[in-house]
Amino acid sequence: MIYLKTEEEIELIRESSLLVGKTLAEVAKLIEPGVDPLKLDRVAEEFIRDHGGVPGFKGYNDFPNTLCTSVNSQVVHGIPNSKALKNGDIISVDCGVVMNGFYGDVAYTFEVGEVSEEIHQLLETTKACLQKGIEAAKAGNRIGDIGFAIQSLAEENGYGVVRELVGHGLGKNLHEGPEVPNYGRRGTGMKLKEGLVIAIEPMINLGKKNVKQDADGWTIVTADGLVSAHFEHDIVIRKDKAEVLSTHEYVEEVLNKKKNK
Ligand code: MG
Ligand code: MG
């Protein structure tokens, strides 16, 4: 189902999204070689509960944890484990919160220690793809315009765009209509209306677009074994532009502080 939100509902989604952004900043403080994803998961769950939220993923379709932690060739839906992160790894951390009946859903891909220039560029481009998608998400445009913007930038850079997993509407449910693919044709698909809240979340592969599911029944991995990046924001469609409800600012403050140490 597709629901257009009232301003009151949009504010509640914003609050949940901001709590996710702050949670990811707590995670950012801990990411370094030697830390394991389960530790990140514990810290995130405690932080969310301390701030009046409930982890949005835990128990969702029986997902066992607060975070999805997807390392290197894992694209999304990785289950946190006790395997220590290594220098040069990347880890996508995807987190959901439900608070006052509304969800926030935000993801960020982190560098662990020093990564190769090739991988750094993939992360930068995936972030730029998210920005392009957001710029295309305004009233009167169509769903296909968002995907077209994301796909064009990714493929210009020689990357693969994951087809099987997509962005989505967001509100009282973690996943609502419409689906928001990261690929598409201009001027196609549902027309975007003011008050529609969607999560835009490009998943961009260093190599080919193909993915497969791991034996754990959750984790999606690239078919060619090359790394994949994932960034996600929650936005509301407004008249002339999208308004971003979530933020990566708290995360980036932490990362900048770590860099300047
Ligand atoms: Mg997410
Ligand atoms: Mg999502």
Image: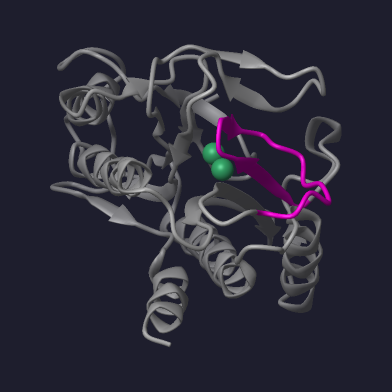
Q: Residue at x 56, y 68 (%)?
A: 28
Q: Which x, y percent locates residue 200?
A: 40, 39
**Where on the picture, by quarter, is residue 195?**
top left
Magenta stretch: includes residue 73: yes
Which portion, as a residue range, is magenta?
Answer: 66-85
Which of these two is toward me, 65 or 31?
31
2 on left or right of 183: right
Q: Which x, y percent locates residue 217?
A: 79, 20
Location of the C terminus by quadrant is bottom left
128 on left or right of 17: left
Q: Which x, y percent locates residue 127?
A: 31, 47
Q: Residue at x 33, y 56 (%)?
A: 244
SS assignment for the magenta stretch, majority: loop
Which of these two is toward me, 117 or 80?
117
* Image mark count: 0
Figure coloring: one colour
Q: Which x, y percent locates residue 229?
A: 44, 39
